[in-house]
């Protein structure tokens, strides 16, 4: 019996040592997986959204050595009374309002500060769209109607074989992809685990084989389409999205702080939602679009691309919210009214006719509740109309 106990003890010791070794070997992956599991918890979500680089692989986006571009302060403005309750109800963490390029309101909430680099989530998609417009203008991408396999041969034979760049920009690829954030077995959450565990986003994408509609026939918001846009950009140029965005967009904008992308295990930028920067810097991007793509005397994004990408051109249902090239167009929008939008309450809202840009970040765990998205638009419109 003693011999058996001695052997059992040795076996348990070996297993404990093996478990410890595996834990040390996979420590980073385990840490990132744990971060994913607690990312949206009520206790941690605000802090997490301002410190994504503490838990995930990431790459800095060079802001260059130029000076920070000026965002002057205009007359301080009192916002409509309903905004205060909205800030509380929607767990808003930052709100910056520009009128004719000047800050007329700026405040930070939930213990966050102006220097926090906040996760954009799907607002990042609008930045990638701007980069595509520049590359088309420069000739690196020949046409928006080119098939994606022209630039990414590895997509041949996948669900994306037959889709064009226009299709993926408009979220009309017809590719089957479950984007239910609340279902842990959904495709979007499987993709999140690939990111957290250091896998390859490209491999995840090329493994998709099912479609539900012909390309261009039906609109359905599937974030993986944006990853394919990024694959096209990389295939057309042979460069990383982070380097291209730095050169073509970030450095000309003169941001206050260097932004960063979350990345997968091989350094590929999480272009569909992994961009992080300060709220004032999000506002700079919105103001540049409000000015037709121009910034400090330089045409950063082609004016015709700004106009085309922010038009409701995707085949959305009649009477529903519109979609362009990775930009949203609210129901009943006036010309020049559009927005970048991300989960949990991230927005860059532009009302060109009124000269208003609103950059807002939040940690709204109820963002999917009925009426919340519509209420956010109503608040932005109320602010714009009050200025």
Image (spheres, grey):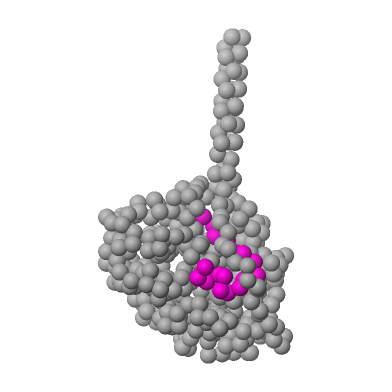
Q: Nearer the viewer, residue 316 or 225?
A: 225
Instruction: Looking at this view, name the residue that lies furthest to the front.
Output: 65
**Residue 240 located within the stretch drawn in magenta:** no
Give the position of the N terminus as an image quadrant: top right
- In the rendering, at what x and y percent does residue 20 appear? 60, 31
Q: Observer-nearest residue: 236 or 12?
A: 236
Is 142 left or right of 382, judged from the image as shown? left
Quarter of the picture holding the C terminus: bottom right
Residue 17: percent from left, percent from top: 59, 27
Is 241 rendered above or below residue 387?
Answer: above
Q: How many labels does the image show?
A: 0
| 254 in magenta | yes
Residue under the point 42% across and 79% down: 305
Q: In this view, does 95 lie above or below 155?
A: below
Determine the image quadrant of residue 224. Answer: bottom left
| Residue 329 in view in this figure | no
Which residue is drawn at the image coordinates 62% and 64% (left, top)?
258
Residue at point 51%, 62% (across, down): 242
Expressed as whole percent of the image width and height from the top left, the position of residue 23 reads: 58, 36
Query: Could you tell me residue 263's position as x and y percent?
Result: 51, 55
Front position in the image: 231 or 341: 231
Is residue 246 shown left or right of residue 206? right
21 to the left or right of 304: right
Q: Is residue 131 visible?
A: yes
Q: Give the range drawn in magenta.
A: 247-263
């Amino acid at each position: 019996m003693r011999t058996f106990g001695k052997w059992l003890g040795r076996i348990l010791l070996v297993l404990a040592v093996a478990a410890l070794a595996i834990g040390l070997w996979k420590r980073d992956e385990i840490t990132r997986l744990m971060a994913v599991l607690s990312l949206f918890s009520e206790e941690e979500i605000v802090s997490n959204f301002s410190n994504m680089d503490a838990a995930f692989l990431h790459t800095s986006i060079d802001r260059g050595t130029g000076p920070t571009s000026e965002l002057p302060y205009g007359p301080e403005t009192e916002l409509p009374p309903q905004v205060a309750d909205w800030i509380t109800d929607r767990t808003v963490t930052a709100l910056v309002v520009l009128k004719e390029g000047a800050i007329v309101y700026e405040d930070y909430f939930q213990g966050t500060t102006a220097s926090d680099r906040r996760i954009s989530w799907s607002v990042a998609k609008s930045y990638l769209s701007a980069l595509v417009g520049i590359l088309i203008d420069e000739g690196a991408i020949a046409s928006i109607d080119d098939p994606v396999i022209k630039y990414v041969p590895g997509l041949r034979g996948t669900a994306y074989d037959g889709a064009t760049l226009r299709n993926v920009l408009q979220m009309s690829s017809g590719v089957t992809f479950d984007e239910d954030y609340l279902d842990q077995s959904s495709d979007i959450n499987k993709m999140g685990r690939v990111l957290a565990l250091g896998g390859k986003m490209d491999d995840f994408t090329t493994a998709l084989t099912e479609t539900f509609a012909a390309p261009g026939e039906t609109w359905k918001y599937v974030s993986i389409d944006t990853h394919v846009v990024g694959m096209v950009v990389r295939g057309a140029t042979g460069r990383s999205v982070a380097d291209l965005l730095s050169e073509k967009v970030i450095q000309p904008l003169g941001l206050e702080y260097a932004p960063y992308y979350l990345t997968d295990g091989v350094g590929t930028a999480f272009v569909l939602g992994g961009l992080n920067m300060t709220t004032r810097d999000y506002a700079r991007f919105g103001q540049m679009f409000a000015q037709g793509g121009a910034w400090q005397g330089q045409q950063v994004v082609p004016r015709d691309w700004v106009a085309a990408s922010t038009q409701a051109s995707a085949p959305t249902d009649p009477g529903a919210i519109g979609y362009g090239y990775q930009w949203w167009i609210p129901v009943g929008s006036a010309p020049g009214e559009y927005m970048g939008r991300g989960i949990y309450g991230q927005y860059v809202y532009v009302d060109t006719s009124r000269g208003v840009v609103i950059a807002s970040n939040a940690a709204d765990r109820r963002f999917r509740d009925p009426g919340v998205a519509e209420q956010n638009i109503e608040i932005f419109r109320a602010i714009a109309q009050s200025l």
